[in-house]
């Protein structure tokens, strides 16, 4: 094998490995993202979608920011508005915490500030559960695009 063939084969292996990791990452992100529609000023969600203890990210076309929701170990539900409290930039889920790419604020899995410049925690949204096991996440009017 000459040097040229060696470099071509090495590059194709690297590109294949890189493409595979991107594809796996893209699939895992899409698994966490759920499209839904608003019902008045609330989001409805089946509670059985949250049984693994991980955040489920919810998005709706008329919702200004995504919502992260999960069931805590004590059985309660936690819903966080993914809006940075520093300058209202969207925050993203990174592992089990949240990051704002605009100025670098970080929030823990309860929405508390870990690193500024944000001073206030992420907004907690009230969650009610009905008799059918459906979650109702309450929104405020400014969170909905008209
Ligand atoms: S808007 Fe998020 S850190 Fe500034």
Image (cartoon, rainbow, N blue to C red):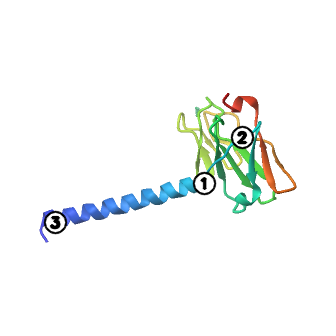
Q: Residue at x 63, y 31 (%)?
A: 86
Q: Nearer the viewer, mark 2 or mark 3?
A: 2
From the top left corner, tell me how far across and down residue 53 is, in percent.
70, 60
Find the residue positioned furthest to the bottom: 1
Above or below — where is 43 with respect to 17?
Answer: above
Q: Residue at x 47, y 60 (%)?
A: 24
Quadrant (top left/top right/bottom left/bottom right) for the N terminus = bottom left
Of marks 1 and 2, which one's residue comes earlier in the chain?
Answer: 1
Q: Nearer the viewer, mark 3 or mark 1?
A: 1
Above or below — where is 1 with respect to 12?
Answer: below
Of marks 3 and 1, which one's residue comes earlier in the chain?
Answer: 3
Q: Quadrant of ligand 1?
A: top right
Query: Callout 1: 10 Å neighbours few (<14), some, many (20+)?
Result: some
Of marks 2 and 3, which one's residue comes earlier in the chain?
Answer: 3
Q: Residue at x 60, y 33 (%)?
A: 117
Q: Residue at x 27, y 62 (%)?
A: 12
List the residue tagged with mark 1: 32
From the top left corner, tell me how far across and down residue 20 is, in percent.
40, 61
Front-most of 143 and 5?
143
The tag on residue 38 is: 2
Q: Secondary structure at mark 3?
A: helix
| Marks 1 and 2 close (CB-CB < 8 Å) | no
Q: CA distance from mark 2 to mark 3?
A: 57 Å
Quarter of the image holding residue 10? bottom left
């Amino acid at each position: 094998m000459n040097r040229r063939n060696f470099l071509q084969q090495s590059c194709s292996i690297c590109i294949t490995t890189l493409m595979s990791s991107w594809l796996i990452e893209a699939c895992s992100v899409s698994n966490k993202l759920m499209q839904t529609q608003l019902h008045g000023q609330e989001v409805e969600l089946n509670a059985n979608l949250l049984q693994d203890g991980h955040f489920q990210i919810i998005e709706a076309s008329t919702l200004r920011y995504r919502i992260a929701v999960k069931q805590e170990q004590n059985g309660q539900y936690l819903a966080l508005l993914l809006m940075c409290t520093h300058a209202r930039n969207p925050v993203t889920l990174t592992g089990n915490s949240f990051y704002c790419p605009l100025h670098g604020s970080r929030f823990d899995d309860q929405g508390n500030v870990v690193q500024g410049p944000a001073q206030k925690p992420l907004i907690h949204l009230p969650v009610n559960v009905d008799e059918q096991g459906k979650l109702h996440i309450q929104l405020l009017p400014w969170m909905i695009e008209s």
